[in-house]
Amino acid sequence: MDYSIRYLTSDDLYIVKTGGHTVGQDFVAMAEGLLHHPKWAQNKNVLFDHQELDFEHMSVKDLEEIRDFHRKNEIKMGAGKSAIVVRSGLLTEWNRIWSQGEKTKNEDKVRIFENYHGAINWIKE
């Protein structure tokens, strides 16, 4: 998986753009990169642009690896919102995949969108 991390000072927001084939280890590496970004602070909002990400084949093992990382880093992440943008038509597939396995405590601060407009508006609420 390829990814880039940008911090928008004007919106106090991170944008993480991903692409390519992914497994759990890739998500963990991306999340570690975000938490080690020079401007990272607890409670930051993040827009994850997964429109170019190939995630359809992720296993429950991959999901558990990602969720384990979230549980271990809950304090460092804080209460910021995570807006996830997927390609049009993939919202149902994303929800199907992520509905598997044990949930994390922060599920209520994560929303999935098929466009930037909805994602940005939710983050600004």
Image (spheres, rainbow, N blue to C red):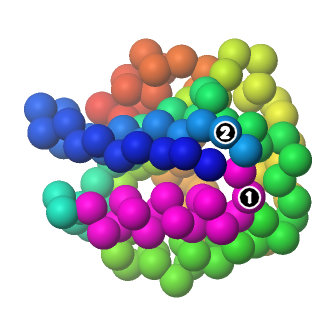
- At horizontal 70% and vertical 73% (from top left) the residue drawn is 65
Specify whether 3 is left or right of 62. Answer: left
- At horizontal 52% and vertical 83% (from top left) the residue drawn is 72
Name the spot of residue 64 as percent of width and height, x first.
75, 71
Q: Nearer the viewer, residue 99 or 9?
A: 9
Q: Secondary structure at mark 1?
A: loop
Give the magenta part as a residue range. 22-37
What's the amino acid at mark 2? Gly
Specify whether 86 is left or right of 96. Answer: left
What's the amino acid at mark 1? Val
Specify whether 103 is left or right of 29. Answer: right
- Give how far apart the Cα atoms at labels 2 and 1 are: 10 Å
* Residue 124, image quadrant: top left
User: Taking the image as drawn, is residue 83 in sight?
Assistant: no
What secondary structure do most residues of the magenta stretch adopt? Answer: helix
The residue tagged 2 is 20
Label 2 vs label 1, nearer the camera: 2
* Residue 21, image quadrant: top right
Query: As drawn, which residue projects farthest toward the left?
Result: 10
The residue tagged 1 is 23
Q: Secondary structure at mark 2?
A: strand
> Which image quarter holds the C terminus?
top left
Q: Nearer the viewer, residue 84 or 36?
A: 36
In the picture shown, does residue 89 fall above or below 112?
A: above
Name the spot of residue 92 as percent of width and height, x first.
81, 30
Name the spot of residue 74 as percent of width and height, x first.
45, 75
- At horizontal 74% and vertical 58% (from top left) the residue drawn is 23
User: Taking the image as drawn, is residue 73 in sight?
Assistant: yes
In the picture shown, does residue 111 fall above or below 80?
A: above
Do the CB atoms of the residues marked 2 and 1 lie less than 8 Å apart? no
